[in-house]
Image (tube, helix red, strand yellow):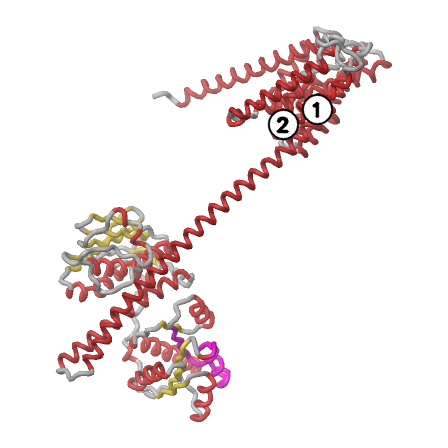
Amino acid sequence: MSNPRSLAPATNSSRGVSYVGSLVAIGAIYLVLAKGGLALASIHPSSTPIWPPTGVALAAVLLGGYQTWPAIFAAALIANATTAGSVATAIAIAAGNALEAVVGAYLINRWSSGCNTFSTPDSVAKFAVICVVIATPISASIGLTSLTIFGYIEQKSFADAWITWWLGDVTGALVITPVIVLWASSRYHDFERHALQETVGVLTTAAVVGLIAFSPLIEQTPGRDPLGFLAILPMLWAALRRGPRDTATVALMLAGITIWGTLTGGGPFTTTDLNASFLLVLMFLISITVPSLLLSADVEVRKKAEERLRRARAELEQKVAERTQELELASAAKSRFFAMASHDLRQPLHALGLFVAQLRTPLEPGERARTIERVDATRKEMDEMFNSLLDISRIDAGMLNPYITEFPIGRLLQKSETAFDQATREKGLRLRVRPSEAWVRSDAMLLERILLNLVSNAVRYTLHGGILVGCRRRGEMLRIEVYDTGPGIPEDQKQNIFGEFFQVPAPEQNRSGGLGLGLAIVDRLRLLLNHPIELASTVGRGSRFTILVPKVDECVRAAAPADLPHPGAFAVDGKAILVIADTPIVQEGTGGLLSKWGCSVLAAGSDEAALVRLAEREQRPDLIISDYHLARGKTGIRAIEQINAAFGSSIPAILISGDTAAEPLRDAKDRGYVLLHKPVDPMQLRAVMHKLFRDHDGGRDAGAVS
């Protein structure tokens, strides 16, 4: 194995060689172009109107970074030292050339998007201003000032030489830099076959127009001069169709042909003064290059905006299609639910009807007691179905907020054993719950709901064998596992079982009831608690559900919360209860049950009727039990508040609702009322009443003591 430390010097050496190689390449290109440009100087050996090295230098710093300046300085130094002046003037000119490139690149990077400067009209304009006004005057000013100081140029020639030098640098920057930067920044997908063919067509057209209008191959006549305007055709084609890269390339091609024609005495810009001819060429090139780059950048921006709009439209259409499909699936699921719920809820209702019919006939005491037990079991089955619907509604409405604590898992295991011991015995199954001393961090109530649903699911689907519940410690997590010897779950159904109203079909399925919501509730609760659930199942052998819960150390054992006392621990004899319900059957049923418990009951159908009845009796109720929905769109909350206002005090109250929507839950929670959902278990109602009486009487006693 190679030593990483030994690789570091090799890497640094490779980078150093690469850096030196790039400097040599840049310097060589700069030197060749510099000697060629200086060969065209006429008013002074160091002041030439044709100076492509400025464009090369600026592009090199933009692409390669500021560390490329030594190559520019060295190449400019050699070119000027071997042309005219002295070593001192050559050093000054080289310093001006390098500073021109570095300052120009810095401002373009800082102010005009760097190498992306040709992507928008605004940045192209900034690039042109930087090149014309700020960067190029640096080289012309430093170079000619040094030549003047050392006596290599007369003061009267300074202005003409400065303009020539400056325009040469400006043209080099505006024509050469875009070509190098844009081609270096091109990506492979810019060279698709169709695009490449159009690029070749644009460049061929530019070459033909350039040869016809500017080359020395055709004799220059006064009638040929207007042909120079044809140059706008390939520039417009490139700007409108091919983008900034091809636009800059066309400008460079026309510049080369125009300079060649002018140098050889052909073309519309030829005059008796070669320097003046070249200055005309420069002004022509600047006038067609900058507007064309601006136009091409604007077209490119519009194309990108159109492409973004097309993509956004396609994405929107895709989302609309996906949402439509989701709605269709939801609608189909809702239809399936109504069909399944109608069937599953009708089963216990049908059974209740049969049991009631039996009770109306003469029965032996033992048979009558067994029938009543069956009625109660059927009622509990319906209650379980409605509770499942209520759990789903509460979770989806965001009404469940986890209360995270640390507690021993043994309590939950014991509850699962107590809850299903009788059910498993009746089915001839064996339920084994292995005790555990582990402590976990979770919401005890919600985790208990998950565990009970998993065990209930196992009991429902297992016909032979048994169920095993246990825990395993795995690092920082505790794995709570529920095994069963049921029919197992096919591989293609393992994701579906956590959906709403889904039940795995089985020829021997136990139709003891249920809406297929148990595992859907489990899935929602595990997301709420962030507890992963794993499933392993083999068809014909059984399944294993695993809940992963954060494990904590057995630190200080908090005192276990005391269980609620048995309802009989608090007497309700003589308590005055006001029952508000807009249906007589509910008034009779609730009033009859409360009367059997020794309560004094006053029933009414609305808050107005209740106030009249209370005024007649001149009695303040100890508790109000009201339906949430009352006649004429009124609510039990309004009725309770009206009665509280009439008595000038807060009376304990219980709301009862058959609505599983979020609104009643929120309304009751916001006002601090207890909300029970129909069908209400009588023992649950009695336990809530006792708690309200205890809390209210305790608070009143505490106030008396103080």
Which one is in front, 273 or 77?
Answer: 273
Above or below: residue 404 compared with residue 13: below
Q: Residue 127 carries which label?
A: none
Above or below: residue 31 compared with residue 544: above
Q: Which badge, 1 or 2, is on the more N-terminal residue?
A: 1
Residue located farthest toward the right when viewing the structure as drawn: 156
* 22 relative to 552 in the view: left or right: right
In magenta stretch: residue 637: yes
Q: Name the residue under label 2.
A: 244
Q: Of the residues shown, which amino acid type is indicated by label 1? A: Ile
Q: Which residue corresponds to the image point at 21% horizontal and 60% vertical from the top-left?
A: 459
Instruction: Report x, y in % for residue 293.
Output: 67, 28
Q: Name the residue under label 1.
A: 232
In terms of image quadrants, where is residue 50? top right
Q: Which residue corresponds to the image point at 85% horizontal and 14% vertical from the top-left?
A: 155
Position of the N terminus, as image quadrant, is top left
Q: Is residue 145 visible?
A: no
Position of the C terminus, as image quadrant, is bottom left
Region rendered in magenta: 632-657
Q: Of the residues shown, which amino acid type is indicated by label 2? A: Pro
Above or below: residue 370 compared with residue 576: above
Instruction: Report x, y in % for residue 351.
Output: 22, 72
Q: What element carries label 1?
A: helix
Instruction: Report x, y in % for residue 575.
Output: 36, 86
